[in-house]
Structure formats: C-alpha cells, structure tokens
Image: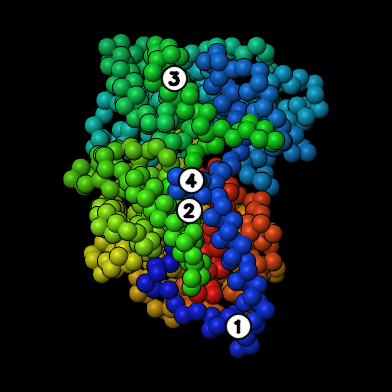
Amino acid sequence: MARYTESMATSSEPLADDLRVGGQATSAEADAVASAIARGRARLLSLQHPDGWWKGELETNVTMDAEDLLLREFLGIRDAAVTERAARWIRSGQRDDGTWGNFPGAPADLSTTIEAYVALRLAGDPPEAEHMRAAAAFVRGAGGLERARVFTHIWLALFGAWPWEHVPAIAPELMLLPPWAPLNPYDFACWARQTVVALAVVRSYRPVRPLPFAIDELHGDEPWRPPAGTTPRGRAFAALDRLLQAYERRPLRWLRELALERAEHWIADRQEADGSWGGIQPPWVYSLIALHLRGRPLDDPTVRRGLDGLESFVIDDERGRRLEACQSPVWDTALAVVALEDSRPEAPGPEHADAVRRAADWLLDRQILARGDWAVRRPELEPGGWAFEFENANYPDVDDAAEVVLALRAVEHPDAERVGRAIDRGVRWIEGMQSADGGWGAFDADNRRTLINDLPFCDFGEVIDPPSADVSAHALEMLAAVGRARVPAARAGLAWLLAGQEPDGSWVGRWGVNHLYGTGAVVPALVAMGVGRDEQPIRRAVRWLEERQNDDGGWGEDCRSYDDPAWIGRGESTPSQTAWALLALHAAGERGDAVRRGVAWLVGKQRPDGGWDEGPFTGTGFPGDFYIGYHLYRLVFPLMALGRCVR
C-alpha cells in the first residue's frame, strides 16, 4: 500500500503562471503540461467503474499462481484448462537463465524458482525440457530444496516432497494464550496472524497427498540443517522448536483438540463476505486447507465461498491466467479522487463532479462500523476506518482511512452532513489507533513485540506491524487537513516522524519503494503540520532528493534498496517514483531546475492515451521479500504531481 496527498489547505504558491527556469517563463512547457494533465484526466475518468470505484491490477511474482495450482492439486480440484492458462503466465516470468525473481529485474530467488518449477511439472512440462533443466540446475547450484524458505517447505511437505519433521513446529495451542501473553496470535501482524493460525492447524495434521512425480532433481549436495539461531533469543527458540517437535509426536489429546477447535472457529469467523480471509492470498489458501483438514467438505458453505471467491481475484488475458495477491479498490479510488481534484481545471465540467460524487458515495458505503482484531488492543475505540479491499471488515487500516478522509474532504457532496459524520468517525478511529511511541502502524496499534521475529518459522516477510514513516505521515497529513495539527496525538506523531529521519535526510518507505516513497510521503506531511520549508528536516530532504535525481530528469529506486544500501534512491526512472519526488519538492516550496526537469520527464514519457508505462515494481508487500506492481500508480501519482506543480 502506498499513500500520499498534500493537504489542500496547505498547498503552496503556483509556479507563477507557468514553469520557470532561472526566471524565464517557458509557455511551451506550460502548454505541454496542461495537455498532459488533460490527457491524464481523461484516461483516469475512462477507467472508473459505473459504481464509482477504480481498481488497478496488483501484479506480483509467480508464487501466487504456482501456489494456486498446488492448492487445487491438494484439494483435488485442479483442471487442465486452469492449469495450462496459469502455466502460460508462469512461463512468461522465467528469465533466460531459467530462474524466476520477485520483481522485474530482481536477482534469482531460490524458493520462487522451486515453486514455479513444481507448478510447471504439474502442468506437464517435462524435466528434460530446456527451460526446466535450466531451472533445476539453478536450484541445485543454490543449495537445492534444502535451502528453501519455510513456506516452500510446507507446500512441498503437503505432497510428500519434504519431510514434515523438517518444518518448524507451529503449535495450535497458541490459540489458548491470552492476548497479554507472549507469542499469542495478536502479537503477530494481522496478515501473519491469519496465516499462522491456519498453518498451525495444517502443521498439526501433517497431511501428505503425493505428487504424481518425484522432484529428486532439485536436491542439493549439502544436507538440510535445522535452524540453530544466530542470537541468544534465536538459539532459545531453536531449542523450543525441538521441544515442540517432540510434543507434536505425543500431544495432550484433549488440549490439542481444544486448540484445534478454537482455531477452526477463529478461522471461520474471519471469512470475509467475498470468501477471502483478509482479502489477501496467504491466509486464504492456508485457511481453506486448514478447514478441509478439519473435516469440512468442498461443498461446505465456508469452503465453497472461499473457492468461489478466488475466481474474483483472477485475471485471464492474452498473457495467461494469474491470481492477484490482493485488490486495492478503496485505496485506488481515494487516490483517484485526490488526483482528479489536484488536477482539476478552473471549469472542470459536469463529468468531473459526477465522477468524484459517485466515488465519494462508494467510499462512504465502504466505511467499516464493526469491530475487528484491532479492537483487542483498543477495546474502547469506536470503529470508523476503511480497508484496502472490496471486503475486509475485520482489518481496516490507518493508511486507507487517512487517504479516504482526505479524498472525502476534497469533494463537494450534496449530503455534506453525511460526509461530515463519516470523516469525524474516521478521524477519531485514526487518532485512537496511534501507538504509544507516537507513530502509526497500518492495521494494529502497538504491534511491535519483536521476539517473534526469531521464531524458526518466521523466515519470510514481516510478521509484526510497528509504526512506519509513510503511514504515520499520512495520518498526520490528514489530521492537519481537518484542523487537528495541534492536538496531543498530532504533536506526538510529529516528534516521532522527525526523530525517524535518516542521516542522509530521507525516510524509509514501508509500503512503497522505498526512501523515495517514504520521503515523498513525509515532506508534505511535515509542511502540513507547520514545519517551515526553511527548517533543517525539510532542507535535508530536498538535498537528498535533488542528489538522487537521474540524468534523464526522473527518479527511481530499485526494490533491492531494502537489502543493499547502494540502491537507496537509485534505479531506473519510473512515473510513480518521479511523482513522489515532485510531490515532496513541491510541498517544500521548490520551483527550480529539479522540478522543471522532473515535470518534463513525466510529460515526455506520457503515452498518447494519457497513461504511463512502468515496468519496475514500486509497491512493497514485505521489504526484502515481496513486492507489488500497482498498475494505477503510474497514472494517479503523476497526475497529482503535474496538477500541483502548475496549480
């Protein structure tokens, strides 16, 4: 998820009547920008659904599709047509060296390549085929199945291709722990919580449904070694895992059944209206397997809704069949409204008013007025947030709620009282979700018990939801926009954000790649909160952005920046990341050559239909592990940036 919006109330002066370079007005450039904005607006309006929402594709790596085929194989529902369409998509992501990565241009990833290879074997690709031999050679050279991540080992264990004894224990008895106890389910971030509960059920049954082939060609030369831990806490958890493995062989039957029954009901109670769990793929597939292992047949209403719901996440076109890991209509719609308002002409016409009103009506209907898991930590807080997806009543998030409030404020709606009530509820909920240190996480408050990071099965992705700079910035920007910049929550958040500035002047991005995203979110928030444009935090951020501008005038940052500092603020120029930099520079009051060159890059890269192309992924799921290509980012953020720069 990624979020921006400079407060309408704090928008700074325009670039005179047009863009300026050294005091010289360039009306041709201004005309080009105006034309680009008009084309972009037309393109964005054309993508709106009749019901008022927008949704761009969320593109990820091929593990979503490989695991979908593995799920269907395990449940006995895989068919030839689905398999071949999915296999076509998986093959399209393979590189010349036979490998798959986690984002375009990424280094080869061992576990992703293993899962893709097994899925293609299910599709009938023979191991002797050239592309399969190349993949297998890479897997063996990288250490083989023995070095894959835990999640990959779990998938292989389901089919007898990996021993369950070599999968870390996940005891379902954790369901019996109270919320204050260490290692209870609510210590995990919501996405990890749902996944861990379901996997605890699966791991306790240790099912095996053999594949119709062996994958011995993927074993490495060195034997598997159990996790030993690299820190005192990690070594302690490794010892605990050995004890749990022994307990798994002879659990207390009454206690195990009590835990499994509670886990089953917990899972079933959290199914969303569209059949998903949390609107995301990992807990969805594992929850279906867990319920099936608990004895629910495929025609059980909960299981059936889950299987049917997966089809609504499928995209099937000339490139093949692929499964979105998530869908982002609330987020996309809020961003689209802000982009249209930022870029609106003096006389926008009736189509503008109609589009944003329909979007506002749709967003108003999406406000969540029921309690979810967040209420475990905030039991007295009244609901009022928004989620990312079409259906996710259990897990609204601060980021979406803040952006929706900003979007609703920008719309002239005929029912101002209804809008006002929704905004008030949203503001109260966001304030109440602040963590004790002053920052905001995405889905939960004070979800930062770091000891679970050392659990042996937590070797992939983030498993906690601590405050982040980008989410906190969006919450603060929203509070400033509604006139609450001076309340204690906002002042504490501002102090937290200022303390989090990196030595180089940037901020880390949690939900977008990476320092460009974080800095692009924070600078507008600081200015909205009253930090002077000549103060050091702003000046340092501006210097960092100007130093990272590419020679072509754009900005880009590679996903590898989360692992390799050499990539921080460096990478191929992209429309969304260039827009993020421009949004920050504009908020900081910059009107010089860096802005002019960035605007020129966006204008020059626009397609005739008003959109932009963007190959690299610029969204972040799990830093270092999982990334997202938001297809609408390449349109809404450039439109925001261009609109503000010539406002």
Q: Distance between the Cα atoms at labels 3 and 2?
A: 32 Å
- Residue that numbered label 4 is attached to: 50
First in residue order: circle 4 vs circle 1: 1
Instruction: Tell me if residue 228 can be seen.
Output: no
Query: Which residue is tagged 2?
Result: 2
Q: Establish if 397 lies above or below 522.
A: above
Q: Mark 3 touching mark 2, by CB under 8 A?
A: no
Q: Which residue is mark 3?
A: 304
Question: What residue is shown at x 54% (from left), y 67% (from top)?
Answer: 641
Which residue appears at 50% of the width and 28% of the height?
A: 310
Give, as a three-letter code, the residue at label 2.
Answer: Ala
Using residue 614 as the reference point, say whether residue 11 is left or right of it: left
Q: Quadrant of residue 258?
A: top left
| Foreground tag (3 vs 4) | 4
Q: Nearer the viewer, mark 2 or mark 1?
A: 1
Image quarter of residue 41: bottom right
Pointers 1 and 3 in contact (C-beta within 8 Å): no
Question: For mark 3, does the 10 Å Cα neighbourhood hold few (<14), some (14 to 19), or many (20 or more) residues?
Answer: some
Q: Position of residue 53 (x, y in %)?
A: 46, 47
Q: Amino acid at mark 3?
A: Arg
Query: Is 181 placed above or below 154 here?
Result: below
Mark sitting on residue 20: 1
Q: What x and y, as percent, mark residue 177?
A: 26, 29
Amino acid at dot 4: Pro
Q: CA distance from mark 1 to mark 3?
A: 60 Å
The reply to whether the C-beta atoms of the residues labelled 4 and 1 are less than 8 Å apart is no
Q: Residues within 10 Å of mark 1 (few under 14, many from 20)?
A: some
**Separation of disc 3 and disc 4 at Cα?**
29 Å
| Picture layout, residue 333 above or below residue 41 | above
